[in-house]
């Protein structure tokens, strides 16, 4: 491998990292801007969350992950959302986008169908979906990178398991469970698709 090739590879990697960081920063700023608007409207945006078994609540599936009930709610969700997003982006950004859309829509629909009568907002369902998917991939995909990431997630975010059990006041456990189920379902569908593709070749 020539020096020019090495330099080009290094520049490409650095460019990719800069793009991730810039897009990540934009996303964080977007969530902060949404929370600022929520604060300025006296919590008005929270009405756009998921309200189970209501027609208007269906639209909340697409808005709820980006709306938080308070600044504390937002800042408690930001670190795991950013970290788990980065970990899932490492193999493929396209895979991350597909997984996130699936988790948000399917997880949100499950909350709409089975959630308590309340307005559910926040990114926690999305977070639990990413968390469950990363662990699932580490177990079933059996690729070294997926296994390492799965172990890291278990070590640093193993305590998230407690968020799957009821009894926590002002916490949408339904969102946590629904997100986790959606994450595992996405992982299983991808695993099944790969097995079917491999069987044809």
Image (cartoon, rainbow, N blue to C red):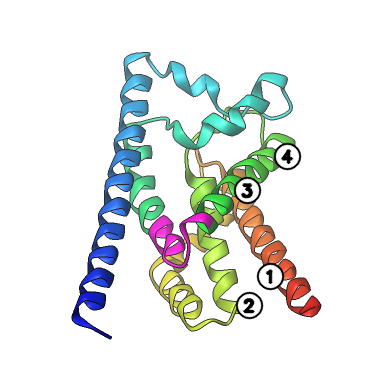
**Which quarter of the figure has residue 183?**
bottom right
Q: Secondary structure at mark 4?
A: helix
In the rendered image, residue 146, in percent from the top left (x then y), is placed at 50, 75
**Which of the two labelled residues, at mark 1 and mark 4, occupies the earlier sequence position?**
4
In the rendered image, residue 102, in percent from the top left (x then y), is placed at 63, 48
Real-space Cα distance between discs 3 and 1? Answer: 15 Å
Q: Residue at x 31, y 27 (%)?
A: 33
**Which of the two labelled residues, at mark 2 and mark 3, occupies the earlier sequence position?**
3
The residue tagged 2 is: 140
The magenta stretch is 84-94
Dot in front, 2 or 4: 2
Q: Secondary structure at mark 1?
A: helix
Q: Secondary structure at mark 3?
A: helix
Real-space Cα distance between discs 4 and 3? Answer: 18 Å
**Which quarter of the figure has residue 164?**
bottom right
Kindly indicate whether the residue at mark 2 contacts the one at mark 1 (C-beta within 8 angstroms). yes
The residue tagged 4 is: 114
The residue tagged 3 is: 102
């Amino acid at each position: 491998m020539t020096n020019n090739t090495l330099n080009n590879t290094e520049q490409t990697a650095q460019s990719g990292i800069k793009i991730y960081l810039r897009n990540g920063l934009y996303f964080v700023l977007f969530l902060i801007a949404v929370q600022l608007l929520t604060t300025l409207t006296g919590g008005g945006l929270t009405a756009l969350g998921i309200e189970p078994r209501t027609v208007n609540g269906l639209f909340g599936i697409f808005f709820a992950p980006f709306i938080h009930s308070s600044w504390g709610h937002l800042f408690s969700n930001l670190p795991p959302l950013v970290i788990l997003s980065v970990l899932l982006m490492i193999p493929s950004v396209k895979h991350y986008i597909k997984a996130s859309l699936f988790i948000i829509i399917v997880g949100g629909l499950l909350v709409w169908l089975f959630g308590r009568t309340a307005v559910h907002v926040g990114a926690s369902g999305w977070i639990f979906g990413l968390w469950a998917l990363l662990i699932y991939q580490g177990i079933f995909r059996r690729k070294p990178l997926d296994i390492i990431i799965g172990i890291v997630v278990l070590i640093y975010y193993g305590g998230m398991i407690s968020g799957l059990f009821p009894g926590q006041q002002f916490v949408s456990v339904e969102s946590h469970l629904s997100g986790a189920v959606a994450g595992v379902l996405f992982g299983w569908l991808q695993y099944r698709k790969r097995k079917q593709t491999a069987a044809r070749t």
